[in-house]
Amino acid sequence: MVGEGNVRSHPAELISFGRDATPLHEGSADVVALPGSTAEVAAVVQVANRRGLALIPRGAGTNLAAATVPIGGGIVMSLTRMDQVLEVNRGEMLAVVQPGVTTAELGRAADRVGLFYPPDPGSRETCTIGGNIATNAGGLRGLKYGVTRDYVLGLELVLASGETIRTGGRLIKDVAGYDLTRLIVGSEGTLGVVTEATLALRPRPEASTTGVAYFAELAHAAAAVDAILAFGVLPATLEFLDDVCIGVVEDYAGLGLRRDAGALLLFGDDGTEASARLCVEQMAEICRAGGALEITTASQIAEAEDLLAARRCTLPALARVAPITILEDVAVPRPRLVEMVEAVAEITEKLGLACGTFGHAGDGNLHPTLLLERDDKRARQAAEQAVARIFAKAIELGGTISGEHGIGLTKKPYLVDQLGADHLALLQRVKTAFDPAGILNPAKLGS
């Protein structure tokens, strides 16, 4: 169905498809199929449906919640061969792409015609649009520009039956029927297999400017975020790193970061040269009034990219420090950010765990990252306790157990704590309506 060269079945070939970027989770597929067209996807899904085989759609495997880990065998369907940008339309400000296109490649295709694709996940050079849609990926520009769901106009989708449907289209306004497009975004491959996406683009900003403020404590940086947003500024970038992250990033990339600071706040904006410069100057002044130890602003694009690199390379830098990095993903209302930051520090300190925290300060999305040795059983048990307590605190503060990584296997046990039993039962009924046999990414969201 997909061509003999596009099937993997040897045990050695299957190893990498039994895991994603989530530590401590591994499964095993019976076979991997790499289809090259919607028709081939539909043919494989039909076989899986007839035989009652699990089918797990997969992109580049950068997921951090074990959402693409196959549990109990079945077919892993890798969509990385479907990697064509089919159209970039400047007049309509949209693109039509296959699911295997990377986020960065879509960005470059848009840039070539003077347009801009705002979603900007940290793994943008590797992660695919299909995976972004499956998890409703966010990124560094989420505060000003929103997340993946805000740019998905329409989808081509293969259902569990093998039928192919289209949702949405090329329109900004369309309220004909239920909004299945938004339902599919964030569904983690449990309701259908995305084979094509129509995505909104934006005019490319004329300029962008970035700055860094250093603080004695992370709580001070969080307070500066509150002050910036209260002032009425809506920046394109408002990110933070704690002292652990500053140290490992500097060791990794040698960017000249200040090691004696307790926290780093990365702020920036885009637009016209004048508006971007004014916004950054305003944010710098607010940070200064909030007790910043030092403030640096970029005067050139290359310098701005170097500053953004400090945030983008945080996870790989942490991964060099310890064999196991458990990267979590909670979000709270912005006014509760300081409380959440302090709670993470208290929880991990009490349990004796090394932890680096970074994230999207502007939208309240934190990434506490636990650093473990591979054979330290005590630390693993403590990490499980820490994760449970961090999730509980986020929920207590009116937040969520996942801002952008998804639920997958790792967070499914905690989903009922956030949603409640009745809400979870409704998700299960939706899953059954789309997938009566339960073949699509079983044991995950809605199953």
Image (tube, grey):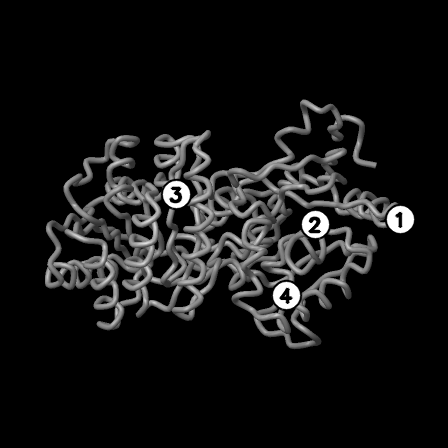
Of tags 1 and 4, the one toward the viewer is 1
Residue 91 seen in this snapshot: no
Q: Nearer the viewer, residue 125 or 53?
A: 53
Secondary structure type for disc 2 = loop
Q: How far apart are marks 4 and 2 (CA)?
A: 16 Å
Q: Are marks 3 and 1 in contact (CB under 8 Å)?
A: no
Check residue 50 in the rendering and tell me which mark sits there, or answer none. 1
Residue beneath the point at 52% across and 39% down: 21
**At label 3, which amino acid type do we have?**
Leu
Q: Label 1: few (<14), some or many (≥20) within 10 Å?
A: few
**At label 4, which amino acid type do we have?**
Leu
Q: Name the residue under label 4.
A: 183
Q: Mark 2 points at which residue?
A: 441
Q: Label 4: few (<14), some or many (≥20) within 10 Å?
A: few
In the rendering, at what x and y percent does residue 421 appear?
62, 70
**At label 2, which amino acid type do we have?**
Asn
Nearer the N terminus, badge 3 or badge 1? 1
Secondary structure type for disc 3 = strand
Secondary structure type for disc 4 = helix
Q: How far apart are marks 2 and 1 (CA)?
A: 16 Å
In the rendering, at what x and y percent does residue 329 appear?
44, 53
Q: Name the residue under label 3.
A: 370
Secondary structure type for disc 1 = helix
